[in-house]
Image: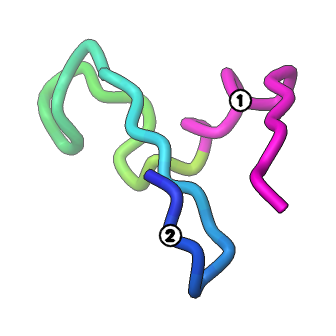
Amino acid sequence: IYFDPALAIKICLPREVSSGAPGDRDVYGAQQHAPLLLWEFELPA
C-alpha cells in the first residue's frame, strides 16, 4: 500500500504460524524485514 501523505509503504508477508503461536520464533516480528533487504522499489515522484 502506498500512502502519499505519509511517504510510506506497508508490506505484509505471510507467516508459517501466527504471532505467539507454539513454534513461533519471532513473536514481535523483529526479523520479518529480512526478506525485504534485497528488494528495490521505484516510487512515483
Q: In the picture provided, is 40 more to the left or to the right than 44? A: right
Q: Which residues are magenta?
A: 31-45
Residue found at the far top of this picture: 16
- In this rendering, the answer to whether 15 lies above or below 26 is above
State the image coordinates of residue 2 (x, y, percent, origin top left): 52, 58
Q: In the picture provided, is 3 more to the left or to the right than 6? A: left
Question: Quick one: label 2, few (<14), some, or many (20+) residues within 10 Å?
Answer: few
Label 1 belongs to which residue? 36
Tell me which residue sits at (24%, 20%) in the image.
23
- Which label sits on residue 10? none
Q: Which of the colour schemes (rainbow, by chain, secondary structure, one colour) is used?
A: rainbow
Q: In the picture provided, is 2 more to the left or to the right than 28? A: right
Q: In the picture provided, is 36 more to the left or to the right than 14? A: right
Label 2 belongs to which residue? 3
Q: Is residue 20 magenta?
A: no
* Image label count: 2
- In this rendering, the answer to whether 41 lies above or below 30 is above
Question: Quick one: label 1, few (<14), some, or many (20+) residues within 10 Å?
Answer: few
- In this rendering, the answer to whether 26 lies above or below 2 is above
Amino acid identity at mark 1? Leu
Query: Along the line of sight, which residue is nearer the eye, 44 or 41?
Result: 44
Amino acid identity at mark 2? Phe
Q: Is residue 34 magenta?
A: yes
Query: Along the line of sight, which residue is nearer the eye, 33 or 39?
Result: 39
